[in-house]
Each structure stands twice: as C-alpha cells, then as structure tokens.
Amino acid sequence: MPSRGILLDIEGTTTPIAFVYDVLFPFARSRVAELVKHADLDLRELNLDHDEDVRAGLNPPPWSKAPLDYIHWLMDQDRKSTALKTIQGKIWLEGYQNGELRGDHCAAKRWVCHRCGGGDLSGRALRRPQPGHMQRGRTQVRKDRSPRVQ
C-alpha cells in the first residue's frame, strides 16, 4: 500500500539546525519572561526537574515563583527537559501563528522525502510534531516542491 504521509522531526530534518539555534532558541528566550508572568502555566514538572537537578548536584539557580533564572539555565545547557520544551513550544506556536516566525523545509530534505515517496509527493501530507506538545502540523507539498504549512 502506498504511503499517505511521512512523519518528520524538526531539528535538521524539516528545519535547518542553524534556524533552530539562531532563530527559534533566541526567540523563545526573549519571550519566556512574558509567558511565565502572564500565562497560566503549570510549573510543577519544571519544579520537579529543578529538584532533581539539585539532588544530582548540578547547582541550578534557586527556584523562585517565576523561575526565569532556572529556565535560562536549562536553555544555556540545551537541556532536553520536557517542561522546558513545552514552554518553548508554546512560545514558538504563538510566533508562527502571529507571523513573527517563518520557517522553510530544507531543500535537501525535500529531495529525500521525494525519493522516499517513490515519486511525486504532490498532494501528500508531510507531518511533523509541533515542538512542546503532541499536536501535529500539516504541510502540503505543491507541484513545485515548495511546502505550504497549514
């Protein structure tokens, strides 16, 4: 049976890794204080991460009601904390939705997708997880091979 879609990850697969480090990470860092201050965030998982870091002797910044120092500390270490990725994902999602962020698929990866698809991918859905949560984005591939993100 022919495939109806291809599941893709973000870093280096659907987006150049430089975009992640040069655009997405600074974008999230510059907006995290506002999110923590004004959003109704559940920080319990982040607090548990902090407690574990303390127990492990990693010397994280002290926990506070608005734990920006700890969040920045996690970002500086490029930690793969689920709680951090959820926060970053909320920021990125808003950025994409309001047009502040725009990304494109890597041309080389489109070629790989085309080759793996066994022919024309026009009209096929490429799925990629949204950072920080389980919703899926959908990209429709057009005849000219350029993606249109929905």
Image (cartoon, helix red, strand yellow):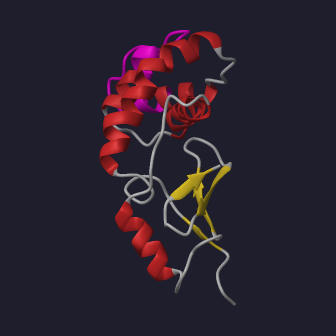
Q: Residue at x 37, y 34 (%)?
A: 23
Residue 54 appears in the figure: no
In the foreground, 35 or 75: 35
Quarter-of-image position of residue 133 = top right
Height in image: 16 above or below 120? above
Horizontally, residue 9 falls left or right of residue 26, namely right
Position in image of residue 17 (x %, y %):
33, 49
Height in image: 115 above or below 100? below
Magenta segment includes 53? yes
Q: Residue at x 66, y 22 (%)?
A: 41
Q: Count of labels shown?
A: 0
Horizontally, residue 28 falls left or right of residue 129, namely left
Q: Which residue extends farthest front?
A: 144
Position in image of residue 40 (x %, y %):
69, 18
Residue 5 appears in the figure: yes
In the foreground, 20 or 97: 97
Magenta segment includes 55? yes
Horizontally, residue 99 falls left or right of residue 16, namely right
The quadrant in which the N terminus is found is bottom right
Position in image of residue 69 (x %, y %):
40, 15
Q: Which residue extends farthest bottom?
A: 1
Position in image of residue 119 (x %, y %):
52, 84
Q: Residue at x 48, y 76 (%)?
A: 114
Height in image: 19 above or below 71? below
Magenta range: 51-71
In the foreground, 136 or 122: 122
